[in-house]
Image: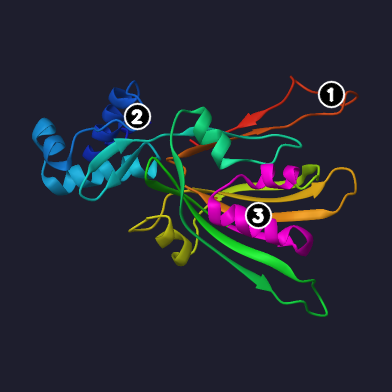
């Protein structure tokens, strides 16, 4: 049987592959070539150059900003570890970048027969002036007033809970990668169908009393954060190492 020829790689994919390798050595948030420059360098039309950048965006390797240009992704390591609630502030500051709250709102949820009174908040978070994450939080009534002040001031939720004399401990966390709904996608700055985006849902409790303190539902741009998951195994459970780390490419 005659060997079948391998299908030809589309031109924009081949160019994207080459640029991905070429730009891999650049520092995060570095300005790279524009559509016009790519078109000229590879002797292709602007539409093909546009598809090249779309492909690199899909891979979470670059971020295009209207009026500013295209930049390499930040990809800040964001660890998910047993007992440590994630913290935007700590991750961003340790990487040497600035962190700010673009917008924040809080409201009290009324008590009903099926659920207690609680504080609900929404936060849009930016890194280096660029929208990076959107978080929806629910706090139990006993910490609601302090949490409202922390949310409005852009302070660490974890630190706020500790300052109240509590012992915050993340009891559970669910991490996935998918596409947020239109409302969240728009808040995150996606003009078209968003690429795979980190979705982190967690519950924080008091490690001494076991009381639930805080639930968080957060969508995080994958060109800004690189979520790493560490799995710790019991001493008597067979394992291949101290843990496994998963990351979204």
Q: Along the polypeptide, which appears first: circle 1 or circle 3?
A: 3
Q: Give the residue at x 37% y 29%.
A: 28
Secondary-structure class at tag 2: loop
Marks 3/2: CA–CA distance: 54 Å
Q: Which mark is residue 127?
A: none
Q: Which of label 1 and label 3 is nearer to you?
A: 3
User: Which residues are the magenta region?
Assistant: 136-163
Q: Which residue is mark 2?
A: 3
Marks 1/3: CA–CA distance: 32 Å
In the picture, measured across the screen, residue 139 lies left or right of residue 154, that is right
Q: Which mark is residue 238?
A: 1
Q: Which residue is mark 3?
A: 216
Secondary-structure class at tag 3: strand
* 155 w.r.t. 243: above or below: below
Comparing 215 with 21, the one in front is: 215
Comparing 242 with 171, the one in front is: 171
């Amino acid at each position: 049987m005659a060997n079948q020829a391998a299908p030809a790689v589309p031109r924009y994919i081949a160019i994207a592959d080459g640029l991905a390798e070429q730009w891999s050595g650049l520092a995060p948030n570095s300005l790279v070539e524009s559509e016009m420059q790519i078109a000229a360098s590879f002797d292709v039309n602007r539409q093909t150059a546009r598809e090249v950048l779309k492909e690199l965006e899909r891979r979470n390797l670059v971020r295009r900003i209207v009026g500013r240009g295209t930049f390499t992704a930040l990809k800040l390591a964001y660890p998910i570890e047993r007992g440590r609630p994630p913290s935007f502030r700590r991750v961003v500051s340790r990487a040497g970048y600035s962190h700010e709250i673009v917008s924040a709102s809080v409201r009290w949820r009324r008590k009903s027969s099926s659920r207690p009174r609680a504080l609900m908040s929404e936060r849009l978070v930016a890194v280096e002036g660029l929208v990076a994450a959107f978080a929806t939080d629910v706090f139990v009534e006993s910490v609601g007033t302090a949490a409202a002040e922390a949310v409005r001031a852009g302070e660490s939720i974890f630190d706020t809970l500790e300052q109240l004399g509590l012992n915050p401990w993340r009891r559970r966390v669910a991490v996935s990668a998918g596409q947020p709904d239109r409302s969240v996608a728009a808040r995150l700055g996606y003009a078209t169908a968003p690429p795979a985006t980190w979705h982190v849902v967690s519950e924080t409790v008091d490690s001494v009393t076991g009381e639930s303190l805080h639930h968080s539902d957060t969508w995080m741009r994958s060109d800004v954060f690189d979520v790493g998951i560490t799995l710790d195994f019991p001493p008597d459970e067979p394992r291949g190492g101290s843990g496994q780390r998963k990351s979204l490419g």
